[in-house]
Amino acid sequence: MSTVIFLLIVVITACLILGRIDIVLIGGAGLLLLLSAILVLFFSVCLVRLIFMRRREAHFTRIGFADEKGWYEVAFYDVDGTEYPCIFPEEGIFRSYFYNPKRRCHVFLNERNGRLFDPISLITIIFGFFAGIAFGVLVYLLFFFR
């Protein structure tokens, strides 16, 4: 990884010394387009997974790590007496508003996997999908459309 970063710095420096800033800009724009495509692909996979999940009524129980090797905390929901973790990480802001144990909500559950999408995840998936498309179009229009 450090070799790639070093090589990238050498190429950018050589382009700047030779006065070829356009190559650096086009390369950066191409990288942004690639990241936008990866973002849209990720949220597309989430949308497809969402289609095959069952909508169930649930209520929030707690926030914690999904397993002992978890990198981030997730929200847990009780669905018919069984506790399931959410696939997406919990939102750190407005925690008391988003995760209210007294309020019932609808979640999308994959019983085979034992995971679910909560309402906040659904909003994140839809917003992220369209934001990724908008960002990719914006980068294309700014750098490649002539």
Image: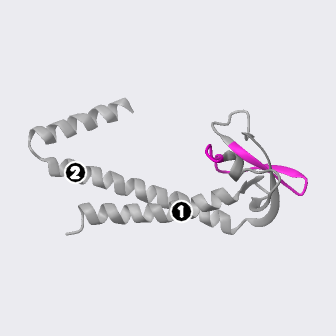
Per the image, label 2 sits on a secondary structure element best described as helix
Specify the quadrant that holds the C terminus.
bottom left
In the image: residue 66, left or right of residue 35: right
Q: Which residue is mark 1?
A: 127
Coloring basis for residues: one colour
Tags 1 and 2 touching, CB below 8 Å: no
Rendered location of residue 48, percent (x, y) = 62, 66
Q: Give the alpha-carbon distance from disc 1 to disc 2, as whole Å.
A: 28 Å
Residue 62 shows in this picture: yes
Residue sitting at 15 percent across and 47 percent down? 21
Residue 141 is drawn in which quadrant? Answer: bottom left
In the image, residue 4 above or below residue 112: above
In the rendered structure, find residue 135 and report the number of the disc placed on it. none
Whichever of callouts 1 and 2 sits on the residue coming sooner in the sequence is 2
Was residue 110 drawn as part of the magenta stretch in this picture?
Answer: no
Rendered location of residue 97, percent (x, y) = 69, 51
In the image: residue 108, left or right of residue 20: right
Q: Which residues are magenta?
A: 74-94
Was residue 90 drawn as part of the magenta stretch in this picture?
Answer: yes
Amino acid on which disc 1 is placed: Phe
Residue sitting at 10 percent across and 37 percent down? 17
Residue sitting at 71 percent across and 47 percent down? 96
Amino acid on which disc 2 is placed: Leu
Q: Which residue is mark 2?
A: 25
Specify the quadrant that holds the N terminus.
top left
Rendered location of residue 92, percent (x, y) = 62, 43
Residue extending farthest left: 18
Density class for disc 1 (Cα within 10 Å; few <14, some 14-19, many ≥20) is: few
Residue 45 shows in this picture: no
In the image: residue 55, left or right of residue 88: right
